[in-house]
Image (tube, coloured by chain):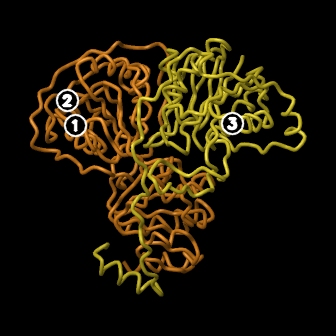
Chain colours: A orange, B yellow
Amino acid sequence: MKTLVLVEHDNTNMKDATLAVVTAASQLGEVHALVVGSGCASVGEQAAKVGGVATVHVADDAALANQLAENVAPLVASLMESHDAFLAPATTTGKNIAPRVAALLDVMQISDILSVESEDTFTRPIYAGNAIATVKSSDAKKVITVRGTAFDKAATEGGSGTIEGVTGAGESGLSSFVSEEIAKSERPELTSAKIIVSGGRALGSSEKFEEVITPLADKLGAGIGASRAAVDAGYVPNDYQVGQTGKIVAPEVYIAIGISGAIQHLAGMKDSKIIVAINKDEDAPIFQVADIGLVADLFNAVPELTEKV
Amino acid sequence: MKILVPVKRVIDYNVKPRVKSDGSGVDLANVKMSMNPFDEISVEEAIRLKEAGKAEEIIAVSVGPQKAQETLRTALAMGADRAILVMTDDEVEPLGVAKILAKIVEEEAPKLVICGKQAIDDDSNQTGQMLAALLGWGQGTFANTVAIDGDSIEVKREIDGGLQTVKLNLPAVVTTDLRLNEPRYASLPNIMKAKKKPMDEKTPADYGVDISPRLTTTNVTEPPVRQAGEKVEDVDALVAKLKAVGAI
């Protein structure tokens, strides 16, 4: 089987999310990668070095600079004439593009796979991860998004893929890019952080969130996450949200502070290796999944923890 | 202009799903069902656009069992003008739903379709993007803010790194994210009024599209259960424990 992997990148650097997808694709067959962007030659070179990648198709075109689904999907659909499976990371980029590709190919997409059982059978979470379904696809071509935390990352060195240029169909004329507000941060990205400190509604305000959560995260070199409640309340921006419909994370250590543990939140973090919970409500559901729990007022406990770690 | 809003009847978001012991699926017997939360946000946004004078009519549509009527009545009670129920007891996959919706779009000619970004039962996150592809329309997924300006719509999207704004020519498909709005509750008088609002009943066969499933679910299991660990007394004990397990 010949697979086509959508490389996640920002036109300069390949993102880690790509590596789990390469691993999933390699379980299906030969791995070909696709870099879609503008001025993205360096990304093509990085992708060619990833272990197991045979070929990297690079579509370098101003019309593809922002990877608008309307422009990218027809290009992927045409490349799928010579590939059997299209795999994208289950990031907002992948989730935006892959279903559009699937519909163009008249294929039912398999979203957010956790494992490859055979070349047509996969497992995937449903009901916020409260159930795991095994699904078999009868479509001749497969369109798949891959949950990054479910597959090991492919090696970023050691591969020697050949790089080939491909041409897209240009501007669809349906949509255009206006602007972007991307948070600039020295912090590790949530989906690749080894430690995450995450805050909930109990923080009470954006000032308190900053005052209590940030110093601990700084000291641990951790990424910062939040529950939906904290995001909805405006304490932190949307890209902090961990949960069923936000980011799915599985760090070495997840420290949940003032988070009660709604099932939608647990869906996004329960595969973390070690879960630590600090909450003043001893009956909070978060304690049912926490390896280490501390029943305490976070406003006292967290500064003390920051001081002592 | 008209706005089409697809809504899905799903397990209530507060209910913890239970996997059937025979592995055939999730037990939905006697379980509280509600409108998919993202679809409530879609209905709300359509109503706000109508209230702002940007739209004249809101049509709610659901593909599902007879009981999906209740979900459509909720949409009508919130403020949709009329409803279409495409009745089927079979599970229709996102691709099939998108094909039915594409036919309804041909008939109704809305300028905007607002879908929830994902349903909280199958968590597919596909229907809106598929519909946009089938119609050859632009798509504004995971919307945080929308603004209609003449023949175009600006959609601020929630993306992994932050926010991205795109401009789409109308007609277009928008899918909603959590921060787009806070849906209203239907008032009792509006619930009563909704009973008199028109609801067409159709079947997938009326639209002549092939919705036979492409995926077969062969097994559904519980995820591995995580055991609760231990509670520690104070911060010192927490720090000691974190060091003991090599967490820090």
Above/below status of B210 relative to A259: above
**Marks 2 and 1: CB-CB under 8 Å?**
yes
Image coordinates of residue B163 in percent, x first then y, are: 50, 38
**Quadrant, the N terminus of chain B:** top right
Q: Which residue is mark 1?
A: A28
Q: Residue at x 84, y 33 (%)?
A: B194
Could you say which is closer to the camera, residue B237 or residue A2?
A2
Subunit that carries the residue with mark 1: A
Above/below status of A17 relative to B43: below
Which residue appears farthest toward the front when viewing the image? B22
Could you say which is closer to the camera, residue A25 or residue A250?
A25
Which of discs 3 and 1 lies nearer the camera? The answer is: 3
Q: Are marks 2 and 3 on the same chain?
A: no
**Tag 1: amino acid:** Leu
Q: Are marks 3 and 1 on the same chain?
A: no
Subunit that carries the residue with mark 3: B
Q: Which residue is mark 2?
A: A1
Could you say which is closer to the camera, residue B35 or residue A63?
B35
Could you say which is closer to the camera, residue B39 or residue B198?
B198
Q: Which residue is mark 3?
A: B68
Image coordinates of residue A259 in percent, x first then y, are: 54, 66
